[in-house]
Image: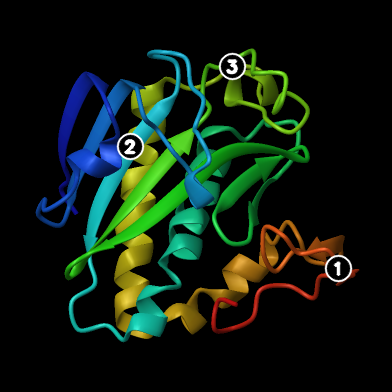
Amino acid sequence: MNWTVHHRPETSSTNLDARGAAPWTAFTADFQTAGRGRLDHRWHSASGVNLMMSAVVPVDGMPPEEAATFPLVAGLAVVGALSSLCPDASAPFLLKWPNDVYVGGRKVCGILCERDGERIIAGIGVNVGERSFPAEIAARATSLALAVNAAPAVAAVRDAVLAALADLHAVWRRDGFAALHPRIAAVDFLRGREVEVVQTDVDTAPVAGVCGGVNPDGS
């Protein structure tokens, strides 16, 4: 798939830039003034050292419940791309449900997917060259620069992720999420871990237990 890539030195949000864009268009920036992640968490990134990208893919004709699994498909694409680019990483790249990529127990990528008509905008932020983080996330964030001997260039990460995203999207559209589930299960960060599930922001009694893994329907 040939992607059309638009780049800006600075923008408010690449996901906003991607609104209304044609499928197979990607938007990147050196810096975002209003970057955000899931649940409206702010996405921290220094200028020019990380991948900040939003890629538009078609979901026309797909049932809503199947389209809703795409964040995991995008995460699997990032895991595959980073694993190929960084074979000497300090630990395997793993997919944390529903939309993060981890290496060595720390988050290296966040994904925010938003429906836009018959398209999905996949906002993908990969910490590539970042070497320091705000105190509130320093213990749980990392970057390729910290996890591998020689971090790849941001452009190389962009191209690898876009190539993997197009390949997996084709499988997903043709065969459904179930066809990718075994590959996702193989890189499941949470499976077998003790977890607490907080149902709401004011949940005073979270459910605790051992995570059994991602289900074949993406839940």
- Report the side of 121 relative to 146 (left or right): left
Local crowd size for mark 3, using a 10 Å CA cut-off: few (<14), some (14–19), many (≥20):
few
Residue with the mark numbered 2: 53
Identify the element where label 1 is drawn: loop
Residue with the mark numbered 3: 150
Q: Quadrant of the N terminus?
A: bottom left
Q: CA distance from mark 2 to mark 3?
A: 22 Å
Image coords of residue 43 (percent x, y)? 49, 32
What amino acid is found at the position of numbered circle 2 in the picture? Answer: Met
Residue drawn at x 38%, y 40% as measured from the top left? 160
Q: Nearer the viewer, residue 196 or 217?
A: 196
- Report the side of 208 relative to 161 (left or right): right
What amino acid is found at the position of numbered circle 1 in the picture? Answer: Ala
Residue drawn at x 41%, y 83% as measured from the top left? 65
Local crowd size for mark 2, using a 10 Å CA cut-off: few (<14), some (14–19), many (≥20):
many
- Relative to residue 189, is residue 89 depicted above or below? above
- Relative to residue 217, is residue 3 depicted above or below? above
Residue drawn at x 30%, y 34% as measured from the top left? 13
Tag nearer the camera, 2 or 3: 2
For marks 2 and 1, the one nearer the N-term is 2
Q: CA distance from mark 2 to mark 1?
A: 37 Å
- Report the side of 182 relative to 140 (left or right): left
Image coords of residue 19 (percent x, y)? 17, 49
Local crowd size for mark 1, using a 10 Å CA cut-off: few (<14), some (14–19), many (≥20):
few
Q: Nearer the viewer, residue 140 or 79?
A: 140
Identify the element where label 2 is drawn: strand
Tag nearer the camera, 2 or 1: 1
Asked whether the residues under the numbered discs 2 and 1 touch, taking CB atoms below 8 Å apart as contact, a structural biologist would say no
Q: Quadrant of the C terminus?
A: bottom right
Image coords of residue 212 (percent x, y)? 79, 76
Residue with the mark numbered 1: 205
Q: Quadrant of residue 92?
A: top right
